[in-house]
Amino acid sequence: MKDRGLLSLGVMLLACAATLFAYDVSAQDFPKQPIKLVVPWAPGGNVDITARAIAPAMSEILGQQIVVENKPGAGGFIGTTGVVRSMPDGYTLMLGSSGSISTGPALARTPPYDPTKDLVAIGPIHSVPMVLTVSSKGKIKTFQDFVAYSKVPGVQISIGSAGNGSSQHLVLELLAYRLGIKLNHIPYKGSGPAINDLLGNQLDSMMDQLTASIGHIRSGNLIAIAQSAKKRSALLPDVPTFEELGIKDFDMVTFTGIFGPVGIPPATLDKLTLALKQALATEQVKQRFDSLGVDIITLDRPAFQTYVNKDFRDSQEIGRAANIVINE
């Protein structure tokens, strides 16, 4: 009986070794088919714009098409959860951002995934400031107007975001907390739908990444009244930061990067990381991101993973301090 047990154990170990060997060989041949890049937000926002800027360059480098697929809903949780549960073979990735990777799960009462354990960073792309905007058709024209109207008895300014638990949501809640005001938060399934309502004057204001709003700001349809980084963006040199407006130590930017489910073979990870780095170095991608006012992140993969994990913990701390909880 003992010999039979040892024999069975030996067979199992050989089977496992064979599986791992086949998996490793498959990783060496990667990619042999198109890669899906999930965007867990609706079209038109910062993450979607970023995905569609980087995917063609990576496709050319890898020799396989990278297909961008929007899966919005539940503040980025639906698309992200799908990626977390996918096969870790490198063929299902996501364009992750502060909202889906750190703030959403940090603020959720019962998060469906742990970004520090269930996802692995492929590499960073860029960071971008938030901007508080209003419609040119609306009654609010300046930050001073925004604060004054918010303090009128019986009035709550409506403010849109990309969704509950998004990075925009965290920033606007922190702003309200620091100013001691109440805002009527209207969450959407991504920035695009929210911007459309703001343009139609159905919202009083919106907190969003500069990348998604800059075109409308340039056209004059939206007015930027404040920005969230420590220093002014080169694209908005006349728009004050929140710190300049009297809110001390207010420095909030969002990150984007590519992520996959934990367990992707090291050889596949290396190929994807290198392809992303090479794509970011192409002139076409650099010009596109320059026009959007973003800062390319140059951290290597381990350093970016550390950065992401810290951002998640920081978001948890801000959520506890401001008592921000979402019920997704």
Image: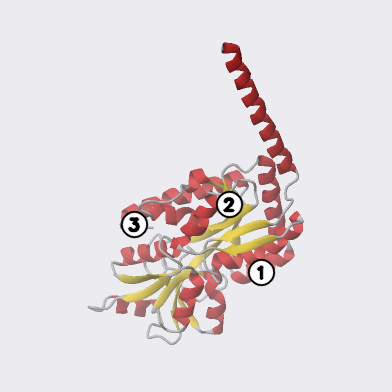
- Marks 3/2 in contact by CB < 8 Å: the verdict is no
Q: Residues within 10 Å of mark 3 (few under 14, many from 20)?
A: some
Q: Amino acid at mark 2?
A: Phe
Location of residue 49 (image quadrant):
bottom right
Location of the C terminus by quadrant is bottom left
Residue 183, percent across and down?
A: 32, 71
Q: Residue furthest top?
A: 2
Which marked residue is nearer to the observer: mark 1 or mark 3?
Answer: 3
Residue 201 falls in which quadrant of the image? Answer: bottom left
**Up/down of 44 relative to 59, above or below:** below
- What residue does disc 2 label? 259
* Residue found 52% across the figure and 61% down from its top: 40
For label 1, the crowd category at 10 Å Cα-Cα, with few meaning under 14, some 14 to 19 and many 20 or more, is some
* Residue 270 screen position, x and y as percent: 68, 45
| Dot 1 or dot 3, earlier in sequence | 1
Decide if residue 281 is in sight here. Answer: no
Tell me the distance, in whole angstroms, between the alpha carbons under discs 3 and 2.
Answer: 25 Å
As helix, strand or loop, the secondary structure at mark 2 comes to strand
Measuring 69% from the left and 65% from the top, which residue is drawn there? 285
Q: Quadrant of residue 152?
A: bottom left
Q: Secondary structure at mark 3?
A: loop
Task: Please state the horizontal and vertical placement of residue 283, each as a whole percent of the image.
Answer: 73, 65
